[in-house]
Image (cartoon, rainbow, N blue to C red):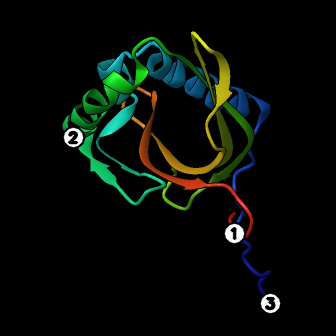
Amino acid sequence: MSQPQHLTVPQVTGDLYAEVQTFYARQMRRADALDIEGFAETFTDDGEVVHADGGRTRGRAEMTEAMRARLPRYKGVSTQHWFGQLLIEPLADGALGVSYYTLVAMVDGDGLSFQPTYTVDDVLVREPGGDLRTRSRIIRRSGPGRR
């Protein structure tokens, strides 16, 4: 009688966790520095973002255009994105599902303020050179009755 075959899910190692955190640190420093092209490069060519308001951008060109349209909002403002409580799960296709909370601090002439908090679900993939890229991102505003 043969033994049952069990599917094994790869473990998330400390090295992988650190790599993912480093990826986000680099990605969001680009966003905070308003390096729009550099930020877009952290997504796959066909990367997709679904925003909390239901808006959707697909591909780097559309993403860059949408970010440029929002630039006036950041005149005289410094932002810092803070990610925490990363939960990383290997997916069947080799990608990584990453869920985390985000907080955006904004500093202007009036001082420090915070944007609402969000839960973000990303799918990260490895490009042929081994670099991580975001294939998809879903952003949901946190609040009572919301995840």
- Disc with the residue nearer the chain's start (3 vs 2): 3
Residue located beneath label 2 in the image: 62
Q: Is residue 30 left or right of residue 12?
A: left
Residue located beneath label 3 in the image: 1
- The quarter of the picture where residue 69 lies is top left
- The quarter of the picture where residue 114 lies is top right
In what quadrant of the picture does the C terminus appear?
bottom right
Rounded to the nearest angstrom, the CA distance separating label 1 from label 3 is 19 Å
Badge nearest the viewer, 3 or 2: 2
The kind of residue on which mark 1 rests is: Leu
The spot of residue 133 in percent (x, y) is 43, 35
Q: Is 94 situated above or below 25?
A: below
- Disc with the residue nearer the chain's start (2 vs 1): 1
The spot of residue 9 in percent (x, y) is 70, 59
The kind of residue on which mark 2 rests is: Glu
Between 142 and 41, the one lying in front of the other is 142
In what quadrant of the picture does the N terminus appear?
bottom right
Q: Residue furthest front?
A: 110
| Cβ–Cβ under 8 Å for marks 2 and 1 | no
Residue located beneath label 1 in the image: 7
The kind of residue on which mark 3 rests is: Met
Q: Residues within 10 Å of mark 1 (few under 14, many from 20)?
A: few
Total numbered circles: 3
Residue at x-position 21% and y-position 40%: 62
Residue at x-position 45% and y-position 12%: 33
Between 134 and 66, the one lying in front of the other is 66
